[in-house]
Image: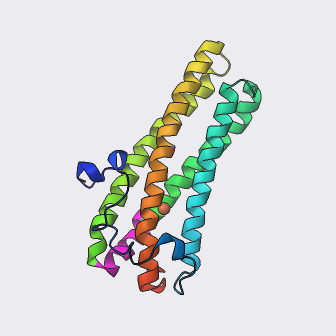
């Protein structure tokens, strides 16, 4: 794991500074999709991020409905684990491709990107730990579904807390990553990033 200054650490961050997001000021978010270099990779990258946000929000809604008594345990059980497993697999797979394939290519494009991609790789480690915690508390919740309602509620509460933490970290990470990768694609074009 890369060492980051505490202020850059995902849990403490409210965004990236301009000296890390070095191209952000030149390419404001509102103008991204109209830029001549905005291509399929940028659009795909953002659509994957939107998908991850939607999956996390859908799981939060499902869990909230269950905790409020609006979903009976059998129905919750049938929906919950497939949705959770898909979301966590999708998230981990996305980060693996970024770490193994794309981030090294961004680093080669411009030496000034190094600090930003150090931060993002560190985020992936933090998020991976949280994914493991959410998978554990999700399994514990399933285990408690057939038990006493009090134990069930406690397990649902623990899972919801862990999942909320993951979603919060993920939202921050996705937004900051977009501030690095999309301006880099607009500056350099997508060709050097496609292996
Ligand atoms: Fe990422
Ligand atoms: Fe990403």
Instruction: Please name whichever residue, 171 or 162, is drawn nearer the observer in this view of the structure.
Output: 171
Instruction: Tell me if 59 is positioned left or right of 166 in this view.
Output: right
* Residue 137 seen in this snapshot: no
Q: Is residue 62 above or below residue 72?
A: below
The residue segment tinted magenta is 99-110
Q: Residue at x 33, y 74 (%)?
A: 107
* Residue 59 seen in this snapshot: yes
Report which quarter residue 181 is drawn in.
bottom left
Q: Residue at x 27, y 50 (%)?
A: 7
Instruction: Tell me if 187 is positioned left or right of 136 in this view.
Output: left
Q: Residue at x 55, y 32 (%)?
A: 160
Q: Is residue 105 above or below residue 18?
A: below
Q: What secondary structure is the stretch in magenta mostly built from?
A: helix
Report which quarter residue 153 is drawn in.
top right
Q: Is residue 49 above or below residue 137?
A: below
Q: Residue 83 at x, y = what percent?
A: 66, 44
Instruction: Tell me if 22 is positioned left or right of 169 in this view.
Output: left
Task: Assess whether residue 104 is covered by the magenta stretch.
Answer: yes
Instruction: Please name whichever residue, 73 or 185, is drawn nearer the observer in this view of the structure.
Output: 185
Q: Residue 10 at x, y = what percent?
A: 36, 49
Q: Residue 149 at x, y = what percent?
A: 65, 14
Q: How many marks?
A: 0
Task: Assess whether residue 105 is covered by the magenta stretch.
Answer: yes
Q: Residue at x 50, y 53 (%)?
A: 92
Instruction: Please name whichever residue, 168 or 132, is drawn nearer the observer in this view of the structure.
Output: 168
Q: Residue 115 at x, y = what percent?
A: 27, 65
């Amino acid at each position: 794991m890369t060492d980051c200054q505490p202020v850059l650490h995902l849990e403490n961050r409210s965004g990236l500074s301009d000296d890390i997001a070095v191209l952000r000021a030149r390419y404001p978010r509102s103008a991204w999709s109209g830029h001549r270099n905005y291509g399929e990779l940028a659009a795909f990258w953002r659509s994957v991020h939107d998908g991850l946000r939607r999956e996390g929000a859908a799981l939060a809604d499902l869990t909230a409905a269950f905790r409020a008594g609006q979903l009976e345990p059998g129905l919750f059980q049938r929906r919950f684990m497939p949705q959770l497993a898909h979301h966590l697999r999708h998230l981990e797979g996305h980060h693996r491709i970024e770490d193994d394939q794309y981030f090294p290519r961004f680093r080669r494009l411009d030496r000034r990107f190094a600090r930003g991609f150090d931060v993002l790789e560190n985020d992936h480690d933090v998020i991976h730990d949280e994914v493991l915690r959410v998978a554990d508390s999700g399994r514990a919740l399933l285990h408690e579904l057939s038990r006493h309602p009090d134990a069930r509620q406690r397990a649902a509460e623990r899972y919801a807390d862990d999942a909320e933490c993951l979603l919060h970290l993920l939202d921050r990470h996705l937004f900051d990553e977009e501030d690095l990768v999309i301006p880099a694609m607009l500056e350099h074009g997508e060709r050097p990033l496609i292996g």
